[in-house]
Amino acid sequence: MNPLNHVAIIMDGNGRWGLKYKNSRNAGHKAGLSTVEKIIKETIKHKIKFLTLYAFSTENWKRPKKEINYLFNLLEIFLLKRIEDLHKQNIKLKIIGIKNFSTKLNKLLKLAEKKTAKNTRLHINLALNYGSKFELINAFKILSKKKNKVNEKNFVKYLQTKDTPDPDLLIRTGNTNRLSNFLLWQLAYSEIFFEKKLWPAFNKKDYNLIIKKFKKVKRNFGRI
Ligand code: FPP
């Protein structure tokens, strides 16, 4: 059975789900947030130590302003309402991506990171305004200015995931089979599961089934 330390998720399909069932993409984002809560709970049950969630990519700025505002408002309300409880549950929240949102949201995110920094039960990386190519170029730039040897060990020090092991498992919901500029370096040896269900419809049974299948995969890491 494979150990499972880190799950990464591309939470895709909110918009389609919202349009289909509530005639509103934003309603899909709201429902998507409930799935986030359920999956966090289940991740803790499995004693998985790291969970990385792709919530907003650098490319998502191309969406209509109204949808972007709705998403960030949802995040603000979530943080205001839930951060104390996440802290009590010994959950650490870290943002990967560039925090260039409204002053209020930037402040809230920094506060949430600071408050939960020492927590140890589950480390959640929330990818917000995150793009893997940007992260890689940035790391190369920093490393090239240092006197350190260019090798993997020195390079990963400058990734935003420097304090996180690489994901063992990547799940992408929403019936789309691509990586969308997510953790391109870190996913080099991850097992990838593409799930047909849209994110708001994804439930603990689906998650548990993927985990069960993951545990049985023969992971070779290049060996035979
Ligand atoms: C992708 O679905 C989802 C997003 C861009 C946003 C993810 C947000 C959530 C899961 C809820 C909010 C979470 C937090 C932490 C505030 P999509 O809109 O691209 O769906 P589509 O492919 O059907 O259009």
Image (tube, rainbow, N blue to C red):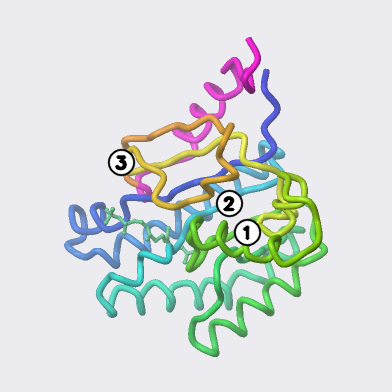
Which of the two residues, 46 or 218, is positioned nearer the viewer here? 218
- From the top left corner, tell me how far across and down residue 157 is, in percent: 74, 56
Of pointers 2 and 3, the one earlier in the residue sequence:
2
Q: Secondary structure at mark 1?
A: helix
CA gap between label 2 and label 3 equals 19 Å
Mark 2 surroundings within 10 Å by alpha-carbon count, few (fewer than 14), some (14 through 19), many (20 or more): many
Location of mark 1 (residue): 140
Using the rendered view, name the quadrant where residue 148 is placed.
bottom right
CA gap between label 2 and label 1 equals 22 Å
Q: Which of the four quarters of the rendered structure image does ligand 1 lie in?
A: bottom left
Q: Is residue 172 left or right of residue 135?
A: left
- From the top left corner, tell me how far across and down residue 30 is, in percent: 37, 64
- Residue type at mark 2? Thr
Residue visible at 56% across and 24% down in the picture: 214
Q: Is residue 120 above or below residue 194?
A: below
Q: Secondary structure at mark 2?
A: strand
Quadrant the N terminus occupies: top right
Residue visible at 17% across and 62% down in the picture: 23
Q: Is residue 216 left or right of residue 151?
A: left
Mark 3 surroundings within 10 Å by alpha-carbon count, few (fewer than 14), some (14 through 19), many (20 or more): some
- The stretch of residues the image draws in magenta is 199-224
Mark 2 and mark 3 in contact? Answer it, CB < 8 Å: no
Label count reads 3
- From the top left corner, tell me how far across and down residue 63 is, in percent: 28, 70
Question: Does the magenta-highlighted stretch encompass residue 222?
Answer: yes
Q: Is mark 3 within 8 Å of ligand 1?
A: yes
Location of mark 2 (residue): 52
Mark 1 surroundings within 10 Å by alpha-carbon count, few (fewer than 14), some (14 through 19), many (20 or more): some
Of pointers 3 and 1, the one earlier in the residue sequence:
1
- Residue type at mark 1? Phe
Q: Which mark is residue 176?
A: 3
Residue visible at 69% across and 79% down in the picture: 111
